[in-house]
Image (cartoon, rainbow, N blue to C red):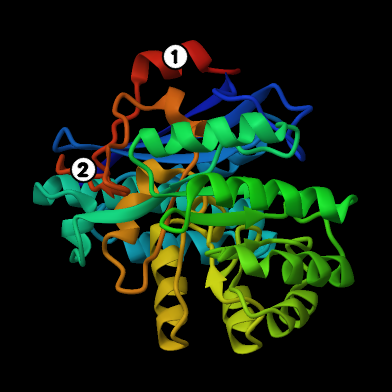
C-alpha cells in the first residue's frame, strides 16, 4: 500500500453560536482539512481548527510541504513518517506551526490505518470504554445575564448533558460569584459544573476568585492565567482545594512533561490540533497517567472522543459545537455520555459539500 496524494482545503466558516469574551469580535472560524489518499482507495481525514480564520495559509503551506516526504510511502508506517517530517523541518522549530501541520498529517494517517483494519479509532487503539462523560462548553458566556444563564443551563441538561462549563471574567468579584451561585442552585448538586476564566486573571485575582468559588463544588477551575504562565498556575493550584485545569495552549509533549513535573495544574487539557496530533496527545496522556493526573481534551470533539475512549485516565470530553458545520455526522449524547462512533476510522466524516462551500483560496 502506498500514499498517492496529500491534499488540503483551507476553510473559513461562521460560528454556530453567539460568543462572549475573548472571542466576541470574531465572526468566522478557520480550519484546514487534510486528506491522505492511498492506492487502495482509502482516504484518511485530518483537521486543524482555530477560533478565527486568519493565517491558515501558513498552516496550508506547511502541510503541503510534507507531500514529498509521504507520497509513495506506506501509510501504516505513520510514526516513522511523522518523525521524519519533524526531523526534516527541525530548522523551523519543533512546536507551533510545524507540530500542528505534522499533527494534521498524523490524524489523517491514523484514520487510514483504522479504516484499513475496519475498526473505529477507539477500538483500533485498544478501547477502554465505548462512551465518555461529556460536558457542553458553549452558551454560558460572560455577557449572558443571569436569567438567561439559568435557562440555557437547564436547556443543556434537557439535551442529555450532566455537566457544563460556565465562563467568568475579572472585575466585579461579587457579581462573578453570584453568577456561579445562581447556576449551581438552578442545576442542583448532581450536575457537574466547570468554570473557565479565559486566561484573563493575575495570580492574586485568580486565587481570590477560586477561593470564593470553592463552596459551589466545581469539577475544576480552568485557565485563569495566560497559557504560558505555568509557575503562576502552580501557585494557584497549591492555594486552592479544587482542581485547576489547563494546557490547551501548550504545543509540545516536552512542555507538558515540565508542567507535570512541577504540578502546575491538576487536570491536563491538551488540544489535539496544537499538541501535534493523536500520537502526541496519547503521549501526554500516558505521562499524565504516570503522575496520576486525568486528561480532558480541548475542542474538536469529533476526533478527541475516540482518543478519550482509549485512555484509562481520560475524563470529560469537551463538546464545543464550533466544528459542527464541517461534519456530516453529529455526536450522540446519552445520559451524560458521548457515544464513540462505530464507523471505521474517526467515525465522524467531514462533509465534503460543506467544505467546498467554505473553501478559501
Q: Residue at x 56, y 56 (%)?
A: 194
Residue situated in front as seen by the camera: 194 or 63: 194
Nearer to us: label 2 or label 1? 2
Relative to 111, is 239 on the left or the right? right
The residue beneath circle 2 is 341
From the top left corner, tell me how far across and down residue 198 is, in percent: 73, 51
Residue placed at 81% from the left, 48% from the top?
A: 175
Marker disc for residue 356: 1
Q: Nearer the viewer, residue 217 or 255?
A: 217
Residue 182 lies left or right of residue 40; in this view the side is right
Where is residue 53, by image quadrant? Answer: top right
> Which residue is drawn at the image coordinates 52% and 17% (left, top)?
359
On the question of residue 324 being in view, the answer is: yes
Name the residue: 57% across, 63% down.
218
Callout 2 crowding tier (Cα within 10 Å): few <14, some 14–19, many ≥20? many
**Residue 318 position in % (x across, y down):** 46, 49
Dot placed on the residue nearer the N-terminal end, 2 or 1:
2
Whether residue 31 appears in this view of the structure is no
Disc 1: CA contacts within 10 A as few (<14), some (14-19) or many (>=20): few
* Residue 49 drawn above or below residue 197: above
Q: Are marks 2 and 1 in contact (CB under 8 Å)?
A: no
Amino acid at each position: 500500500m502506498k500514499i498517492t496524494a496529500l491534499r488540503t482545503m483551507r476553510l473559513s466558516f461562521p460560528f454556530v453560536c453567539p460568543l462572549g469574551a475573548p472571542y466576541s469580535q470574531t465572526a468566522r472560524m478557520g480550519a484546514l482539512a487534510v486528506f491522505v489518499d492511498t492506492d487502495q482507495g482509502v482516504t484518511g481525514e485530518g483537521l486543524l481548527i482555530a477560533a478565527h480564520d486568519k493565517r491558515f495559509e501558513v498552516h496550508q503551506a506547511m502541510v503541503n510541504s510534507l507531500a514529498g516526504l509521504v507520497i509513495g510511502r506506506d501509510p501504516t508506517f505513520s510514526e516513522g513518517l511523522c518523525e521524519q517530517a519533524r526531523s526534516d523541518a527541525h530548522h523551523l522549530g519543533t512546536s507551533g506551526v510545524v507540530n500542528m501541520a505534522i499533527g494534521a498529517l498524523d490524524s489523517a494517517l491514523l484514520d487510514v490505518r483504522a479504516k484499513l483494519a475496519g475498526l473505529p479509532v477507539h477500538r483500533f487503539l485498544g478501547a477502554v470504554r465505548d462512551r465518555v462523560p461529556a460536558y457542553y462548553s458553549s452558551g454560558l458566556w460572560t455577557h449572558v445575564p443571569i436569567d438567561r444563564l439559568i435557562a440555557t443551563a437547564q436547556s443543556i441538561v434537557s439535551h442529555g448533558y450532566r455537566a457544563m462549563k460556565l465562563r467568568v471574567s475579572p472585575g466585579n468579584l461579587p457579581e462573578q460569584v453570584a453568577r456561579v451561585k445562581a447556576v449551581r442552585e438552578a442545576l442542583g448538586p448532581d450536575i457537574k459544573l466547570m468554570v473557565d476564566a479565559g486566561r484573563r486573571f493575575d495570580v492574586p485575582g485568580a486565587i481570590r476568585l477560586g477561593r470564593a468559588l470553592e463552596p459551589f463544588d466545581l469539577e475544576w477551575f480552568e485557565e485563569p492565567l495566560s497559557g504560558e504562565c505555568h509557575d503562576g498556575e502552580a501557585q494557584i493550584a497549591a492555594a486552592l482545594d479544587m482542581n485547576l485545569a489547563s494546557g490547551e495552549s501548550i504545543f509540545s509533549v516536552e512542555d507538558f512533561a515540565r508542567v507535570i513535573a512541577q504540578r502546575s495544574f491538576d487536570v491536563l487539557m491538551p488540544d489535539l490540533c496544537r499538541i501535534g496530533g493523536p500520537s502526541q496527545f496519547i503521549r501526554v496522556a500516558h505521562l499524565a497517567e504516570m503522575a496520576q493526573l486525568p486528561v480532558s481534551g480541548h475542542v474538536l470533539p469529533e476526533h478527541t472522543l475516540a482518543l478519550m475512549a482509549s485512555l484509562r485516565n481520560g475524563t470529560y470530553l469537551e463538546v464545543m459545537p464550533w466544528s459542527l458545520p464541517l461534519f456530516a455526522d453529529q455526536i450522540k449524547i446519552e445520559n451524560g455520555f458521548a457515544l464513540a462512533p462505530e464507523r471505521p476510522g474517526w467515525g465522524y466524516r467531514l462533509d465534503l459539500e460543506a467544505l467546498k462551500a467554505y473553501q478559501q483560496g
